[in-house]
Structure formats: C-alpha cells, structure tokens
Image (tube, grey):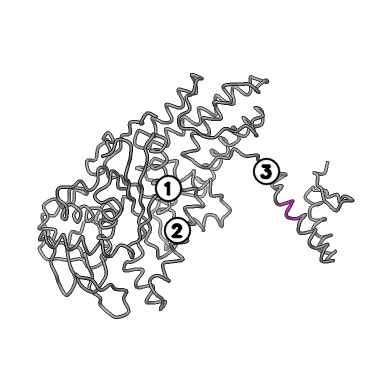
C-alpha cells in the first residue's frame, strides 16, 4: 500500500512540515495521558480523542504504529488525596484508572500498544536523573534535586519562553505552576513526612517530579525519542518544555521528538470550563443527560484539533442531527440495495472504480493527511451523502449496482476514522420504543407469570397496550407481539 504523504503543524517550528518518521513505514507516538485522581472532564476527553483521530488517520495512511499514553498515578494531588482518605496511592488511583479506560471504551477509542505507569517506571526516572547529574545540570537543595535551567542553553526552544530575566536558584517544588513563570523545576522531591508515598533510591528517599515522568517513560518504552509527541496546548509550557530540557540535557546527541502536536482548549458555552461557573462536565455528566456516546464522539472530533471547540448541549444536538443524516443514508443503502447480509469487511487496499467515488476517497484521505483536517474530511462525507441520495432517488433497480456497493465501502472507510456509524440491522423503533425494550417487557411478564404474580403480568400487558403493542400467547407457551393498527 502507498503511504499517504502527511504534513503536520509542528509546535516547535510553528509551521506545517512534511512528516518524515525515522522509519518510513513505522511511527512511534507518545501522548500525555491522564492524572488519575478523578473522572476526566470533556476537555481532557477531547485531547484523548485527538490522539485517536491521529492514530486512525495514520493507519488509514498506511503506517504501522507503536503508540504510548502514560498514566500519571503519582503527583501532588494524588498524594494529598490518598493521605486525606487514609488509603495507599495504589488504592486511590485504581478506580480512577479503571474509569479512564471505561471512558475510552465508551467513546470507541482504539487501544494503544503501551500504557506505562509512573509508579512502575521509578528506576528509569532515577537513571535519567543520574545522567543529568553527570552532565552537570542538577543541584540539590534541602534534599530535593532540581534542574538548572541556566546551565541548559536550549531551554525555551519549544515554547519560545523568555529565560533572560530569570534569577539563578529560583525554584519550583510544585508539579504544576503558573504559565510564563520560569524557574528551576524539581526532578526529585525529598520526602517531607512519613505519610507521603516515597521510594528509597540511589538519588535519595522521595518521589519523582511530574515533568520527569514522561521523559523517563518515553525512553523506557522506545529506547530513545519518538516521531510524534502529543498533548493539550496547556502542556506546551511548562510540562513539554521541561520534558525536552531533561531529555536533551541527558542525551544531547539524540532527537527527542520529531513533531510536537498540541490540541487546543475546549470551551463550554464560550467560556473556560469551571466548577464555579457550573459549566464543568465529565463524560458521565453528559451521558446522564441522555446523550449517546456516538453523538459526543462525533461532536468532539468534528472541529480541527488546533481550533478551540465551543461545547454546548445545543451544539451537541446539532452534531447528533448531522450524524443521523449520514447514518440514515447508510441505512438507505442497506435497505434499498438489499445489502444487510452482504456488508463487506473494510479493506484499506480496496481500489475504487467509480470515478465520483475515487475522487471523494482521495479528498477524504488528503484532508486527513493535511494536518488532520477533519472538517474538510467531513465535507467529503456529506458530498458522498448527497450523491448517494441523488442516485437512490433516480434508480429503482439497485441489486447489482456497482455504485451502491462501492459507496457502502467508502462509508465503511470513513467510519474507520469516525467510528460512530452502524452497518448492522437497525432495531425496529415504534414511536421511540425499541424492539429490545419490548422483548425485555415480554420476558419480565413471563417471569411474573411463572412466579404466579399475575397482577404484575397484567400490568406489563396493559402498559404495552397503552403504547400500541399487542401481545399474543401461543399454545406452545411463546409470546408474540405486533403494533396495533
């Protein structure tokens, strides 16, 4: 298969650049993952979906991937909460880690090759600090170890931050701090009290600073640097700048990252998300309001990753309507083309022969290759919807239609990116009542009758009749249903 020629907006250069991985066929990617101390909010979710869009696009483009996302299971917030609740760090983070993976599963995010945990990478972090010590970039203060920014001339290359006014020896002990405030950052934190989680190592008793973790885990998984590093735009400084400083400081002759990609902020009703403004949402919050995961996924990936996404429940409704327009066209192909039992398996290597579909296929792929331009890719999908409906409106005999068969294959291909469309027999819906629900009620009625709870059985029958569903019990003991005329 021919490799699609991708270009990416590299945060380091601020320009679009041709993507040239170290291996022409294989791509290594590292993405900053969750700090597992609570449910991920939808801003986090958007950045994780961006990683999924990147992955799916590169796979469609012919690459093989070796991809990682870290799990930060040790930091200030986690330690403070575990002490407050009088449980171990491991006990505290376990349910939040499970919740993170459940969120990814709910939104059809593909599983990556690696999910390294900070707590399982301590030796790698210690080794990195030792290398930095040998290179003269570390100093000790009150038992903690700090990276000396003034001794590293390349600091600021990624974020373009100005270090000229920095005073020597001004330090930050916190894992997170204010933007544009340049200070030496902590690599290894000395244990302050016995309640704190700590490790006994060659560089002291304590724990790693947050910025150290990713640099060490990248080296642990890949042995050197990666082709692509992703994260939210809020991580550009200080986190990613500090990552780069540690990695280049320890290994100055190696390329740490080829391309930096950053996902923009998510706004809610035009404002920054905040609990005090009551516009703070987790995925579960939105699901509880009755929105389905497919609509949420579609909405969060439909804007370009470098554009701010203004989230609102009304816009989510608009996305649901747009998504249903595509889905209804797919159902129409399957219905009118009598293809329910003939849905082919997706193939990246399929060559389209219908000129219109060849063109749309190329437009779709080229949009993704152009810095993951999902809005432009969506435009191709809606053009496909238009020409398919036009074709169905003007043709009655579709059983052997090459156009319809290839159009279905193109929808299958686009769904490799969107992962929200169904190609299976749709469940019959009667005024909002699904067949599954009806069958559940029939089963509940059967159980009630077996338990001689005839009042409940009658109540279920009457409720179904009120909704226009008539039941019939056969001599064989089975129950059938039909819609009232």
Where residue 463 appears, x then y in whole percent? Answer: 79, 55
Residue at the image point whose x is 48% and y is 55% from the top: 103
The residue identified by callout 3 is 427
Query: Toward the viewer: 117 or 172?
Result: 117
Distance CA(mark 2)–CA(mark 1):
13 Å
Name the foreground residue: 337 vs 371.
337
* Closer to us: 65 or 409: 65
- The mark found on residue 49 in the picture is 1
Q: Kindly report the distance in space between the C-alpha atoms of the residues bearing marks 1 and 3.
A: 28 Å
Say if mark 2 contacts mark 1, CB within 8 Å: no
Q: Quadrant of residue 395?
A: top right
- Label placed on residue 250: none
- Neighbour class for label 1 at 10 Å: few (<14), some, many (≥20)? many
> What residue do we see at 29% from left, 73% from top?
198
Q: Position of residue 68 (x, y in %)?
A: 35, 51
Q: Quadrant of residue 151?
A: bottom left
Give the magenta-colored segment's residue range: 437-441
**Residue 100 circle label:** 2
Secondary structure at numbered mark 2:
helix
Helix, strand or loop for disc 1: helix
Residue 67 in percent (x, y) is at 36, 48
Dot 2, crowdedness within 10 Å: few (<14), some or many (≥20)? many
Distance between the alpha carbons at the discs numbered 3 and 2: 30 Å
As drawn, which residue projects farthest toward the right? 475
Q: Element under label 3? A: loop
The quarter of the image holding the C terminus is: top right
- Look at the magenta stretch and give its main secondary structure: helix
């Amino acid at each position: 298969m021919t490799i699609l020629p991708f270009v990416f907006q590299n945060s380091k250069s601020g320009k679009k650049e041709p993507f040239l991985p170290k291996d022409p066929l294989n791509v290594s990617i590292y993405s900053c993952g969750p700090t597992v101390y609570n449910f991920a909010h939808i801003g986090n979710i958007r950045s994780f979906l961006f990683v999924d869009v990147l992955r799916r696009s590169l796979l469609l483009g012919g690459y093989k991937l070796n991809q990682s996302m870290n799990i930060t299971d040790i930091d200030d917030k986690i330690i403070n909460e575990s002490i407050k609740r009088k449980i171990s760090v491991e006990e505290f983070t376990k349910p939040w880690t499970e919740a993170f993976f459940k969120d990814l599963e709910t939104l059809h995010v593909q599983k990556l090759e690696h999910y390294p945990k900070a707590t399982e990478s301590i030796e790698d972090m210690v080794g990195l600090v030792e290398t930095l010590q040998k290179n003269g970039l570390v100093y000790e203060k009150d038992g903690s170890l700090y990276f000396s920014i003034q001794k590293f001339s390349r600091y600021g290359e990624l974020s373009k931050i100005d270090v000229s006014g920095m005073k020597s020896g001004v330090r930050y002990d916190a894992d997170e701090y204010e933007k544009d405030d340049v200070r030496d950052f902590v690599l290894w934190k000395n244990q302050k009290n016995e309640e704190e989680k700590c490790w006994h190592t060659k560089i002291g008793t304590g724990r790693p600073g947050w910025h150290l973790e990713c640099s060490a885990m990248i080296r642990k998984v890949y042995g050197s640097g990666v082709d692509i590093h992703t994260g939210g735009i809020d991580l550009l400084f200080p986190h990613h700048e500090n990552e780069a400083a540690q990695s280049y400081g320890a290994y100055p002759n190696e390329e740490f990252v080829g391309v930096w990609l950053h996902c923009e902020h998510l706004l809610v009703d035009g404002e920054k998300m905040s609990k005090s403004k009551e516009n703070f949402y987790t995925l579960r919050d939105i699901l509880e309001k009755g929105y389905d995961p497919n609509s949420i996924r579609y909405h969060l990936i439909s804007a370009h990753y470098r554009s701010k996404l203004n989230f609102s429940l009304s816009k989510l409704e608009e996305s649901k309507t747009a998504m249903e327009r595509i889905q209804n066209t797919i159902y129409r192909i399957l219905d009118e083309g009598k293809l329910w039992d003939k849905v082919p398996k997706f193939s990246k290597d399929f060559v389209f022969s219908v000129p219109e579909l060849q063109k749309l296929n190329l437009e779709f792929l080229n949009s993704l290759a152009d810095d993951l331009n999902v809005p432009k890719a969506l435009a191709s999908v809606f053009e496909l919807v238009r020409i398919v409906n036009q074709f169905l409106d003007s043709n009655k005999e579709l059983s052997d239609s090459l156009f319809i068969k290839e159009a279905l294959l193109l929808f299958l291909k686009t769904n490799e990116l969107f992962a929200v469309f169904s190609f299976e027999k749709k469940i019959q819906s009667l005024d909002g009542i699904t067949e599954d629900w009806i069958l559940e009620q029939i089963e509940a009625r059967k159980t009630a009758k077996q338990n001689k709870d005839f009042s409940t059985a009658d109540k279920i029958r009457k409720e179904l009749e009120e909704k226009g569903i008539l039941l019939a019990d056969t001599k064989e003991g089975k129950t059938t249903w039909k819609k009232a005329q």
